[in-house]
């Protein structure tokens, strides 16, 4: 993998970590009553998932495979034993939540969305650590 690609991946991981830290710092029950904070959390989550999707695509390209859709790229990293299967499933779940938040599929139940973000945020952080370790090796 060339150095330019590694650098770009590291930038995306940094973005992901920054978004995760913001969410962890501000995620509380108050967001259900604070529309501005809730929307900020949703936006940060969206950007975190977009960053991880970009990382998956770039790693796939770095392994001489054409990047495809987000779900296929995650599957590819699982098949290559870069990600554990459980993590792949959680990343797909995060991507699905991101899509629901952005597009409002079937409406968004804020309580459910906030609970899901709380449940998934650790997996996003874990992904960033796995990818940092993979890049270093």
Image (tube, rainbow, N blue to C red):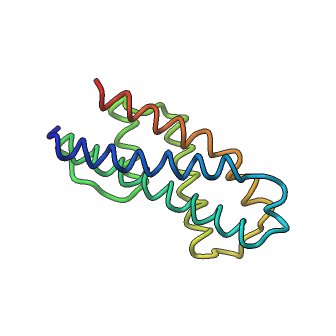
Nearest the viewer among 67 and 2 is 2
Q: Position of residue 42 (x, y in %)?
A: 63, 64
At 38% across and 33% down in the image, what residue appears?
Answer: 132
The percent position of residue 135, horizontal first and vertical second, equals: 30, 32
Q: Name the residue at 39% across, 35% down.
A: 131
Task: Locate residue 2: give its quadrant.
Answer: top left
Residue sitting farthest toward the left? 2
Query: Of residues 39 and 89, which is closer to you in this image?
Result: 39
Residue closer to the observer: 35 or 101: 35
Task: Check the image and report above or below for 6 versus 32.
Answer: above
Question: Residue at left 68%, top 48%?
Answer: 25
Q: Horizontal placement of 28 versus 121: left or right?
A: right
Q: Which quarter of the image is occupied by the C terminus?
A: top left
User: Residue 73: where, in percent of width, then height?
Assistant: 36, 49
Which picture quadrant has residue 119?
top right
Q: Quadrant of residue 45?
A: bottom right
For this view, does 66 lie left or right of residue 13?
A: left
């Amino acid at each position: 993998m060339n150095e330019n690609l590694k650098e770009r991946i590291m930038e995306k991981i940094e973005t992901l970590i920054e978004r995760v830290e913001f969410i962890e710092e501000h995620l509380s029950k108050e967001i259900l009553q604070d529309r501005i904070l809730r929307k900020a959390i949703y936006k940060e989550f969206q950007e975190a998932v977009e960053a991880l999707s970009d990382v998956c695509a770039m790693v796939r390209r770095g392994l001489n495979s054409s990047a495809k859709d987000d779900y296929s790229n995650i599957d590819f990293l699982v098949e290559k034993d870069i990600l554990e299967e459980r993590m792949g499933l959680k990343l797909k779940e995060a991507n699905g939540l991101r899509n629901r938040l952005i597009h409002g599929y079937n409406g968004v139940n804020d309580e459910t969305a906030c609970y899901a973000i709380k449940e998934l945020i650790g997996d996003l952080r874990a992904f960033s650590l796995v990818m940092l370790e993979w890049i270093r090796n």
